[in-house]
């Protein structure tokens, strides 16, 4: 127990809480458990409640204060907030041109040494000026028109990453204005939109979903109720300074940023100091390669001449410094016109509305189709035919329509209704379409009678984690089904080189490859075969559980729903689905024919699972490239030991296995304080477990 005076104890608690908040929010490296922090926090709250005179504006208890605002008060910036010239040439030549211009303006001969640059990410959020006086945050303002912004102090105070006072606040400069970007991470953005959707579904009137993280961040910063702003997952990166009094700035920009970091502000760890055009080009390329794996959006990189003395020599043209440039990447979002909506039929008969777009260049390729997910999404985003829509394509993800530009809507743009458009019939086979209670998707009820479902079923059957048939891709499956050569899965194994070679554009060699691939696939495992059948709700891990539990296919085919329910992790829906599948004579026939073609696997007598399952109940997430194991191999090892491999990191994840170029999953794991293993760590865990 402490015997210190309340004032001394309050000061001590504030120091402790500032220290731990910095470790947690800025450095991502907490020293104490959350509960311990909460205890200190509550102690301070209690002290302040009993002694209101001890309250200080920089107390960690004072993040959310103040009341709902009607409008924002204008703030005249002591030093204008400039913008940067944008280099629109997204190729390496954009960087080369900037370096050449800087050298020319400085009058440097080719023989003189390369210029040093600070290279940074161009965060896609909104610019904020934080004013610290004697180390305490006194004001936060938006950029506005550069001369005058808006006072958003109340909302900015709710951002945990922004210190209410600087770390070395007792020796802090009289005035230090920190400039940087407020942004929202992509995963936080997804979760935010998910929550918004729930609110809307519950009937909330004034809620909406956001088109992108930048929009959501801007909305939150200009939110009139600070308590609401506090609920938005805002983050901050510092990248420069405004007015400074009482501090002799370091000579290089990169050292200024380092000093801000030391003062407790979050800065981007990917920033670098590079030399000359070559250094800029390499930075642009490196960041471009990992852009999609970054946890937040960027729209380019920023190059700044690092020596502040050189910056001064270069000066400004109109409102832009000559010493800095923003070098863009191809945009990941573009506007275009929605010409029509098509409907595609998937493997399980799922009907997906697909936007037919006026072709647009986005994320590095020309896009003319983008998914609209389902009818609910179309309604939620209020997408209408003829609308101007925003299309997003990031990395390898399927392009999607993320929203509409409502004020560009042509008069009487018609709504789209999937059921009405299809007149209730599957566009491929004409079977009735159905939508089960509580489901968002319409489905074709035609099953394998439907050519579209047949194609997808064949592709699934042939997939790498199923029968692994080499040489059987999309195009060929289209041809095989469209030409009528294949109607059922067993017919695949009856294809000979002669029949195949007769197909258009089919070379002898590819025909022979496929026949070899088919032959090789015949020796398989019960797990693969079960998974390959494409039974609804039977993914790979359920297939594995079934194979282990029953040991033989016949026992699975003849199992009652009750018996199926005995398998670990099989619930009523899955059990019913398996039972229904094998109750249909055409499915049993397909299985018999496949066996007759020579597909075989080892069976055992079904004592359930006899192998030890030391990792049972443990969930793993894999990210990045491991030095020797492929992702599939790592997955197999974990699953063989009874563990599960999930696609995304959450509080329920037990371990994250990270390799080279690990992305946002690793960040998330660090944020949640989860144990992180490398390949060697995984191997020793497996060994220990054995
Ligand atoms: S420096 C004089 N650095 O880009 C230079 N700006 O037009 C002033 N931005 O809205 C800005 N990342 O918020 C700088 N690393 C970075 C940046 C950055 C994003 C934004 C900034 C402003 C715009 C500049």
Image: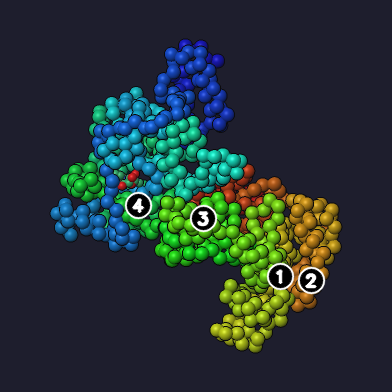
Q: How many residues crowd around disc 4 within 10 Å: few (fewer than 14), some, or many (20 or more)? A: many
Q: Which residue is mark 3?
A: 383
The Cα atoms of the two marked residues, 1 and 3, are separated by 32 Å
Q: Is residue 232 above or below residue 332?
A: above
| Element assignment for label 2 | helix
The Cα atoms of the two marked residues, 1 and 2, are separated by 10 Å
Of all residues, the one furthest to the front in this rendering is 412
| Chain-order first, disc 4 or disc 1 | 4
Q: Which residue is mark 4?
A: 301
Quadrant containing the N terminus is top right
The quarter of the picture showing ligand 1: top left
Q: Nearer the viewer, mark 3 or mark 4?
A: 3
| Chain-order first, disc 4 or disc 2 | 4
The Cα atoms of the two marked residues, 4 and 2, are separated by 58 Å
Q: How many residues crowd around disc 2 within 10 Å: few (fewer than 14), some, or many (20 or more)? A: few
- Quick check: is the Cβ at mark 4 less than 8 Å away from ligand 1? no
Task: Identify the disc placed on residue 448.
Answer: 1
Q: Which residue is mark 2?
A: 586
| Element assignment for label 4 | strand
Q: Is residue 9 above or below residue 256?
A: above
| Chain-order first, disc 2 or disc 3 | 3
Q: Quadrant of residue 199?
A: top right
Q: In the rendered image, is residue 237 in sight? A: yes
Q: Nearer the viewer, residue 362 or 336?
A: 336
Residue at screen point 62% across, 62% down: 420
The Cα atoms of the two marked residues, 3 and 4, are separated by 33 Å
Label tally: 4
The Cα atoms of the two marked residues, 4 and 1, are separated by 50 Å
Q: Nearer the viewer, mark 2 or mark 3?
A: 3
**Mark 1–mark 2 CB contact (< 8 Å):** yes
């Amino acid at each position: 127990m402490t015997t210190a005076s309340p004032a001394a104890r309050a000061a001590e608690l504030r120091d402790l809480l500032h220290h731990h908040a910095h470790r947690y929010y800025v450095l991502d490296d907490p020293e104490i458990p959350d509960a311990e922090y909460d205890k200190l926090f509550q102690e301070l709250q209690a002290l302040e409640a009993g002694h209101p005179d001890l309250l200080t504006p920089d107390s960690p208890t004072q993040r959310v204060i103040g009341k709902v605002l009607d409008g924002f008060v204008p703030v005249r910036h002591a030093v204008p907030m400039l913008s940067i010239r944008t280099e629109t040439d997204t190729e390496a030549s954009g960087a080369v041109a900037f370096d050449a211009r800087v050298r020319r303006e400085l009058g440097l001969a080719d023989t003189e040494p390369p210029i040093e640059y600070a290279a940074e990410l161009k965060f896609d959020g909104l610019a904020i000026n934080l004013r610290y006086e004697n180390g305490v945050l006194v004001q936060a303002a938006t950029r506005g028109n550069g001369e005058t912004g808006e006072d958003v102090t109340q909302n900015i105070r709710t951002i945990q990453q922004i210190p209410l006072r600087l770390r070395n606040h007792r020796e802090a400069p009289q005035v230090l204005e920190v400039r940087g970007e407020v942004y929202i991470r992509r995963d936080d953005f997804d979760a935010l939109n998910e929550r918004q959707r729930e609110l809307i579904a519950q009937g909330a009137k004034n809620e909406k979903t956001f088109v992108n993280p930048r929009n959501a961040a801007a909305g939150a910063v200009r939110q009139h109720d600070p308590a609401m702003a506090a609920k938005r997952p805002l983050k901050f990166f510092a990248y420069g300074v405004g007015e400074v009094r009482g501090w002799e700035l370091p000579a290089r920009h990169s050292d200024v940023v380092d000093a801000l970091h030391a003062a407790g502000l979050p800065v981007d760890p990917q920033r670098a100091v590079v030399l000359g055009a070559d250094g800029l080009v390499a930075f642009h390329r490196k960041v471009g390669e990992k852009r999609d794996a970054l946890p937040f959006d960027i729209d380019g990189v920023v190059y700044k001449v690092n020596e502040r003395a050189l910056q001064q020599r270069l000066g400004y043209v109109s409102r832009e410094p000559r010493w800095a440039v923003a070098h863009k990447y191809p945009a990941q979002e573009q506007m275009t016109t929605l010409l029509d909506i098509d409907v595609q039929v998937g493997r399980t008969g799922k009907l997906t509305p697909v936007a037919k777009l006026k072709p647009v260049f986005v994320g590095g390729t020309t896009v003319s189709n983008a998914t609209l997910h389902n009818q609910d999404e179309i309604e939620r985003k209020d997408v209408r035919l003829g609308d101007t829509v925003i299309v997003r394509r990031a990395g390898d993800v399927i392009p999607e329509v993320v929203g509409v530009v409502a004020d560009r809507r042509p008069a009487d743009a018609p709504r789209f209704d999937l059921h009405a458009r299809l007149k209730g019939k599957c566009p491929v086979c004409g079977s009735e379409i159905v939508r089960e209670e509580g489901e968002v998707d319409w489905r074709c009820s035609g099953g394998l009678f439907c050519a579209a479902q047949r194609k997808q079923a064949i592709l699934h059957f042939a997939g790498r984690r199923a029968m692994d048939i080499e040489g059987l891709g999309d195009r060929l499956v289209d041809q095989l089904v469209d030409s009528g050569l294949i109607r059922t899965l067993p017919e695949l194994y009856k294809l000979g080189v002669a029949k195949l070679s007769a197909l258009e554009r089919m070379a002898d060699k590819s025909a022979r490859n496929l026949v070899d691939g088919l032959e090789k696939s015949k020796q398989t495992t019960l797990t693969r075969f079960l998974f390959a059948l494409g039974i609804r709700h039977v993914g790979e891990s359920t297939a594995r559980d079934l194979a282990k539990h029953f040991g033989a296919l016949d026992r699975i085919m003849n199992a009652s729903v009750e018996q199926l329910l005995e398998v670990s992790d099989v619930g009523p829906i899955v059990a019913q689905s398996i039972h229904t599948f094998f109750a249909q004579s055409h499915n049993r026939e397909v299985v018999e024919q496949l066996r007759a073609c020579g597909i075989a696997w080892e069976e055992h007598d079904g004592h359930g699972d006899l192998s030890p399952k030391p990792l049972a109940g443990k969930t793993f997430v894999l990210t990045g490239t491991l030095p020797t194991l492929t992702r599939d191999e790592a997955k197999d090892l974990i699953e063989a030991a009874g563990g599960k491999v999930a696609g995304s990191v959450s509080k329920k994840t037990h371990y994250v296995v990270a390799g080279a170029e690990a992305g946002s999953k690793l960040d998330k794991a660090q944020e949640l304080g989860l144990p992180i293993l490398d390949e060697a760590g995984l191997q020793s865990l497996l060994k220990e477990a054995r």
